[in-house]
Amino acid sequence: MKTDAWLARYVGLERHHEGHNNHLAYFKRIFDEAPAAYVVTGATHLIVDANGAAQRMFNRPLDQLRGKPLNLFVSTSDRQIFRTLITDIEAADDTVVRPLSIGPDREMDKDVIFSARAMRGPDGNVEGIYWLFVASLLAGDTDLL
């Protein structure tokens, strides 16, 4: 009888796990296929993940983005401001929204608006930052839409 109970519990856990995998795959697909550029950086400000729109925005495939500092893709003229913005984002309790120039090939800068929020662990420490980039319609740039 103990074996039957254990097996029933195992099968239940297996189904539960499959359900989580389906949910994770669903949300990963939403992230990857979203029309806006999403980037996730870790605590050291290196890119952990970027969706398809972000890969197009930076003109780089994911394997060339992962592990790189996000500031490499910020316009040279905005890099000092960007460092200050990271500090502001990490200190904020809410989302920070600002304009920024990015240069995916360092040849032509694009003006974007970003929205960013620090992700915090259970201890309150910053574990990374969620970034959302959208085209600046005021600049007439619709490439990112």
Image (tube, rainbow, N blue to C red):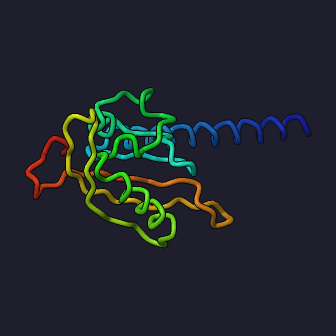
* Image position of 125 (left or right of 75): right
Residue 15's place in the image compared with 86, above or below, is: above
On the picture, is 27 further left or further right than 4? left
Corner quadrant of residue 70 = top left
Quarter location, residue 115:
bottom left
Q: Quadrant of residue 82?
A: bottom left
The front one of 6 and 102 is 102
Task: Find residue 112 and report its horizontal and vertical position in percent.
Answer: 23, 52
Residue occupying image coordinates x 50% and y 40%: 48
Q: Residue at x 49, y 47 (%)?
A: 41
- Seen in the picture, residue 69 relative to 125 is either above or below; the reply is above
Quadrant location of the C terminus in the rendered image: top left
**Residue 56, position in %: x, y?**
27, 34
Q: Residue furthest left?
A: 140
Which residue sits at x=10%, y=54%?
139
| Quarter that holds the N terminus | top right
User: In front here: 139 or 121?
Assistant: 139
Point 44% across, 61% down: residue: 117
Q: Determine the residue located farthest toward the bottom in the rendered image.
A: 93
Single out the residue that lies furthest toward the right. 2
